[in-house]
Image: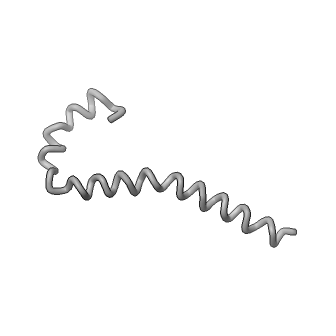
């Protein structure tokens, strides 16, 4: 029975990590895609302070 229990825990942890890491990966991809436009991001930095949910 413990041999059957360990994979279920492993898969649940894997799913939790995937759900936690998907937004991080999308953020990294977003930043890498906007890398040539870094001055524009810095120009709009006060906007992020005014609207923190962006």
Residue lying at the far top of the rendered structure? 50
Q: Give the x, y percent position of residue 32.
A: 26, 58
- The structure residue drawn at horizontal position 40% and vertical position 57%, both measured from the top left corner, is 25
Residue lying at the far bottom of the rendered structure? 3
**Quarter of the figure that contains the C terminus:** top left
- The structure residue drawn at horizontal position 53% and vertical position 53%, both measured from the top left corner, is 19
Q: Quadrant of residue 5?
A: bottom right
Side (left or right) of 36 relative to 8: left
Side (left or right) of 53 relative to 10: left
Residue lying at the far right of the rendered structure? 1
Q: What color scheme is it?
A: one colour
Q: Give the x, y percent position of residue 39.
A: 12, 47
Q: Exactly how many numbered labels are in the figure? A: 0
Q: Quadrant of residue 16?
A: bottom right
**Quarter of the figure that contains the N terminus:** bottom right
Side (left or right) of 16 relative to 28: right
- The structure residue drawn at horizontal position 41% and vertical position 53%, both measured from the top left corner, is 24
Q: Give the x, y percent position of residue 35.
A: 19, 56
Q: Quadrant of residue 13?
A: bottom right
Compared to residue 28, the image places residue 46 above or below, namely above
């Amino acid at each position: 029975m413990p041999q059957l229990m360990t994979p279920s825990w492993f898969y649940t942890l894997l799913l939790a990590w995937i759900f936690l890491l998907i937004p991080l990966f999308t953020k990294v991809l977003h930043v890498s895609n906007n890398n040539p436009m870094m001055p524009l991001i810095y120009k709009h930095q006060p906007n992020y302070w005014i609207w923190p949910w962006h």
